[in-house]
Image (cartoon, grey):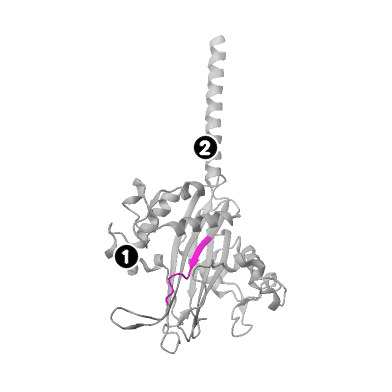
């Protein structure tokens, strides 16, 4: 009987251990799932150029350049990166002698990931890798790490244009681009991260880049962003939308940029009440408040549901204002670029 009791006790202990391991494993898996979603960017107009004359005496017209390093990031309960999508929107706007815009204002802006091999880094790369391939390696390296660990990445200055190239064995042969802005964008994503419902499995980053609002001697780039987390059924468990509105004005007499090239460029969400929409708003809601209402409406819906939102044209500048009871008193801005960005985020979600 004593032997039987011991055997029974042993069996019970084994089952307890198995159960504990199973619970522990489930807890680890739960902790590893996304609980927060963040969207960050670092935007600069520093590479914009005044009118100049090159070494051969040829006049080089003024040019506005807006560079945005973008990061959509899903974090777990311990602040580790579960998923990360990085990209870069580089927009160049040239001017004619009379300061009219030389670019096609209707052309769709493409990011470096969208350009793929068309970006043309491979032929100049010492490792034979295109930009999108290198950024994919950086994303892979970031996954599983906290923001503090990512910021601690050892880097080196290769030249003036590459002040922060990775200098760790696992990256030196796969990433030769300078990475400081992408690390800073991930940090921003962490700082503004919002809680999301459980079940997020795929992360998408969508964008719409437009120069259509540019005018003579005044370049403008509007970059609409959507970071979206989807569940296994393709329903939104979390979404952040934002717009970076970058302006580069020129003095037509001196042909020089009049904006501070080194000033921080904030998105509409970052500007908050300072954006100033509330003064012209019939519902007395600021841009970030209206964006929050639209995000709330999107949660639980599929990308197809979101694209099907009923809209109406209010005027020439507001061609797609929500026309459904749950939004008409909360969102009066035009939303076509947000819907398109979310649709794109679903297409590239991974």
Answer whether residue 344 is visible to the viewer in this image. Answer: yes
Residue interval drawn in magenta: 40-49
Labelled disc at residue 196 = none
What element does badge 2 sit on?
helix
- Quick check: 94 above or below 131? below
The quarter of the picture where residue 196 lies is bottom right
Residue placed furthest toward the top: 2
- Quick check: 175 above or below 347? above
* Place of residue 61 in the rendered image (x, y in percent of width and height, measured from the top left): 39, 82
Residue appearing at x 42%, y 68% in the figure: 111
Q: How many marks?
A: 2
179 left or right of 193 in image:
left
Label 1 belongs to which residue?
Answer: 121
Labelled disc at residue 25 = 2
Crowding near the residue tagged with mark 1, few <14, some 14–19, many ≥20 C-alpha atoms within 10 Å: some
* Place of residue 152 in the rendered image (x, y in percent of width and height, measured from the top left): 46, 47
| Viewer-nearest of discs 2 and 1 | 1
* Place of residue 299 in the rendered image (x, y in percent of width and height, measured from the top left): 61, 61
Residue appearing at x 41%, y 84% in the figure: 102
265 left or right of 61 in image:
right
Answer whether residue 1 is visible to the viewer in this image. Answer: no
């Amino acid at each position: 009987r004593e032997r039987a009791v011991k055997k029974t006790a042993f069996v019970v202990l084994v089952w307890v251990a198995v159960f504990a391991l199973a619970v522990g494993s489930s807890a680890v898996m739960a902790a590893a799932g996304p609980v927060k979603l963040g969207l960050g960017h670092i935007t600069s107009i520093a590479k914009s150029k005044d009118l100049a004359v090159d070494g051969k005496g040829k006049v080089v017209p003024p040019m506005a350049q807006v560079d945005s390093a973008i990061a959509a990031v899903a974090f777990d309960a311990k602040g580790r990166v579960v998923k990360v999508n990085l990209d870069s929107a580089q927009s160049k706007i040239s001017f004619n002698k009379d300061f009219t815009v030389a670019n096609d204002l209707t052309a769709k802006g493409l990011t470096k990931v969208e350009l793929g091999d068309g970006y043309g880094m491979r032929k100049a790369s010492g490792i034979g890798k295109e930009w999108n391939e290198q950024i994919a390696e950086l994303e892979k390296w970031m996954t599983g790490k906290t923001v503090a660990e990512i910021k601690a990445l050892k880097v080196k200055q290769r030249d003036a244009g590459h002040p922060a190239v990775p200098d760790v064995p696992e990256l030196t042969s796969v990433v030769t681009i300078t990475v400081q802005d992408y690390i800073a964008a991930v940090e921003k994503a962490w700082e503004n991260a919002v809680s999301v419902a459980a079940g997020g499995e795929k992360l998408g980053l969508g964008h719409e880049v437009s120069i259509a609002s540019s005018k003579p001697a005044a370049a403008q780039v509007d970059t609409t962003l959507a970071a979206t987390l989807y569940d296994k059924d393709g329903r939104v468990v979390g979404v952040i939308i934002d717009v970076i509105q970058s302006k580069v004005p020129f003095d037509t007499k001196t042909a020089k940029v009049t904006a501070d090239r080194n000033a921080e460029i904030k998105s509409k969400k970052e500007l908050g009440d300072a954006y100033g929409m509330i003064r012209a708003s019939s519902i007395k809601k600021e841009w970030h408040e209206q964006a929050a209402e639209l995000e709330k409406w999107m949660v639980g819906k599929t990308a197809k549901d979101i694209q099907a939102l009923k809209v109406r044209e209010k005027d020439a500048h507001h061609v797609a204002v929500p026309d459904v009871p749950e939004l008409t008193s909360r969102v009066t801005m035009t939303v076509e670029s947000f819907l398109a960005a979310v649709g794109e985020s679903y297409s590239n979600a991974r």
